[in-house]
Image: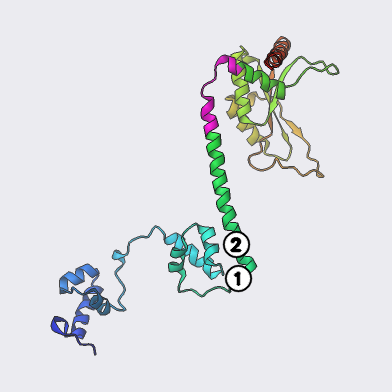
Amino acid sequence: MTTLPGKYADFEGLRAQVVALRREGLSRRQIRDRVHIDNNDLLNRLLEGEPPPEWTKRPNAKDDLRDQARELRLKGLTYDQIQIELGCSKSSISLWVRDLPKPDRRDAKEQAKLAARKRWDHELAIRDEARQETKAAATREIGTLSDRELLFAGVALYWAEGTKDKPYARRESVIFVNSDAGVIQLYLAWLKLIGVGSERLSYRVMIHESADVQEAERYWADQVRVDAVVFRMTTLKKHNPKTVRKNVGETYRGCLVIRVSESAELYRRIEGWWYGIVGAATLTE
């Protein structure tokens, strides 16, 4: 039997009173104020074995992380491995899983590999941040485009990606094919600048037959802001089973083909602009 001096001399009687209050749903503070106990150590002893009422338990934002950490620990993962998986501190992990059995000790080579992976992941994150900052800074450098700048950009773009007249294949037609939505947007802005109206444009999707053709048609229709029903018949490319394609998955939407009607004269202007740009660049050397 525990006895204490002074006003706490009747420990058992005091404990019975404290436990009764606890079971009524009072918090530690309420019990302390009700019974006038100033000693926290004593209050802990009096409440030993008595769980707190549910209403006093505060939700913890890390409850989900803690549960995941415990699950990973039970699977045999080390603190380092759990930290990599969840991104939380090892001190928190230690607190959450300290009552669980320790996994078998990993050999030195495995530990070295894990440490190397952590360093490499950190390095990759730093590199990615630097890459994004470089891209953002370069974007800011461009600012707005003048009509003359857009003219030059569009001519160079067409000469790189558009169909061209060849001595062995005479075709003075303006046809542009690309799979990049940004390139398509720039090209359309350029056509508008040089006076090509939307009524002269026709669209057609070109894509592998194994892809989601309807989704690709909807995607490109949204990009050029027209109804997909006005698209010409999609060109399906047959899949060669001996070829390993990398352009697969949800982001693969094939290419968009944009044709300008009655475009022979426009093609000649584009070719002239291009050679004018080349000649001007040569003269600056």
Secondary structure beneath dot 2 equals helix
Compared to residue 33, the image places residue 119 above or below, namely above
Query: In the rendered structure, which segment of residues is drawn in magenta?
Result: 137-150
Quickly name the residue at label 1. Answer: 106
Residue that sits furthest to the left in the current view? 7
Q: Earlier in the sequence, mark 1 or mark 2?
A: 1
Q: Is residue 46 magenta?
A: no
Quadrant position of residue 284: top right
Say whether residue 183 is visible.
yes
Q: Is residue 145 magenta?
A: yes
Q: Residues within 10 Å of mark 2 (few under 14, many from 20)?
A: some
Q: In the rendered structure, are the residues bearing label 1 and label 2 in contact, judged by CB atoms less than 8 Å apart?
A: yes
| Point 25% across, 79% down: residue | 46
Residue type indicated by callout 1: Arg
Q: The N terminus lies in which quarter of the figure?
A: bottom left
The residue that mark 2 highlights is 114
Instruction: Give residue 71's position: percent from left, percent from top.
Output: 51, 66
Crowd around label 1: few <14 · some 14–19 · many ≥20 (10 Å): few
The quarter of the displayed image where residue 254 is located? top right
